[in-house]
Every structure is written in C-alpha cells, then in structure tokens.
Image: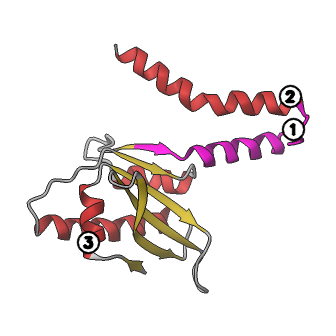
Amino acid sequence: MIFYSNFDIKRLYVSKHILIDGTYVFPKGFTQTIIFLYYDYLTFKFIPAIFILNNNKTQIGYQHAFQDIKEYFLNYKNNTKENLQWETFTIDFERAIINAFNLFFNNTNNELLIKHICCYFHFLKNGSQKLQNEGYTAQKFNTEYNLLMDFLSQLPFQYNIHKMLRKK
C-alpha cells in the first residue's frame, strides 16, 4: 500500500538527493513502513514524500515496492518535460534493501545508474552488533571495544577519501 501526492512525486523526481528509510512504526497487518524522502534546499531538511506499508522485509518485498515506485515515476515522466535529477540515494545498511536497490537501478550492462550511500547510523549499529556477537562487550570503559568502534566509525570516511585521492 503506497501513499503519496502528485506534488510529492514531482519533488522526489526533480530532487538530487533521496533518502529511503524503513521504520518500525506501522499499522496492524504490516511489518514496516518504507519512507522515501527528498532533500529540500530551502529548508535544508529531508521531507517525506512517499510512504509504503510493507508486509515483507525481504529482498523480494523491497523489489515489489521499488517496482511500484518505478511505475509512478514512469507515469510522471510521460506527462512532463522535466528530467530526472537523482544523484545519490541514502539507504539502510541492510543486505535485502541494498540488493533490491542494485537490481532496480542497474542498467543492461549491470552498472549502477545512481550512486547509493549506506546509512552511517546503521553501519555503526551493525558493526557494534557484530563486535558484541564476537564476544566484545559494549561497556563504557571497555578500551578494546571502544578502540574497535572508533576504528570502525572511520572506515566509511577513509574509503571515500581514498577514492577521491585516487581519481586525481
């Protein structure tokens, strides 16, 4: 089940930066609400545009949601002269949604058409969970755990800096 307005579809279509977030506030009978947000340069905030009530948090469930959204955008594209502006998508650091996103935004040469960025919050949350599963404890004064989390928190930035330096 998808909720949106034509104004929201237009704003999302012409926005450069899109955020997709799954929340766990949903009506009975569903397992998740997926929200598409666009970045508004006037308010410097992400504005919710599309709400999807999802009852399947698997890759197939996300693919169905993305396919429905694709149809709305194709419909909009056929009725406008505006060009698609998307540059980046920020998505949850979750394998099912990443795989569905990659399938949805690949071209025939299997190249990503739009750059996606995984959510930093979810990256750290998953890293912390992995460390705890490996036997490290998340205590305030646990030096080894804190050092590993500090190192982990810097990885996304180091990777991006390395990529930028390599381009020059």
Q: Quadrant of the C terminus?
A: top left
Residue placed under numbered mark 1 in the picture: 136
Question: What residue do we see at 31% from left, 40% from top?
Answer: 111
Q: Looking at the image, can residue 58 be seen? A: no
**Mark in front: 3 vs 2:** 3
The answer to whether marks 2 and 1 mark residues whose Cβ atoms lie closer than 8 Å is yes
Dot 3: element: helix
> Is-magenta flag for residue 121?
yes
Q: Seen in the image, is 165 located left or right of residue 81?
A: right
> Is-magenta flag for residue 68?
no
Q: Seen in the image, is 46 located left or right of residue 124?
A: left
Along the polypeptide, which appears first: circle 3 or circle 1? 3
Residue placed under numbered mark 3 in the picture: 7
Residue 124: percent from left, percent from top: 67, 42
Residue placed under numbered mark 2 in the picture: 144
Disc 3 residue type (three-letter): Phe
Residue 23: percent from left, percent from top: 58, 66
Q: Quadrant of the N terminus?
A: bottom left
Q: What is the span of residues highlighted in magenta in the rendered image? A: 116-142
Query: Farthest top residue?
Result: 168
**Mark in front: 3 vs 1:** 3
Question: What residue do we see at 53% from left, 56% from top?
Answer: 96
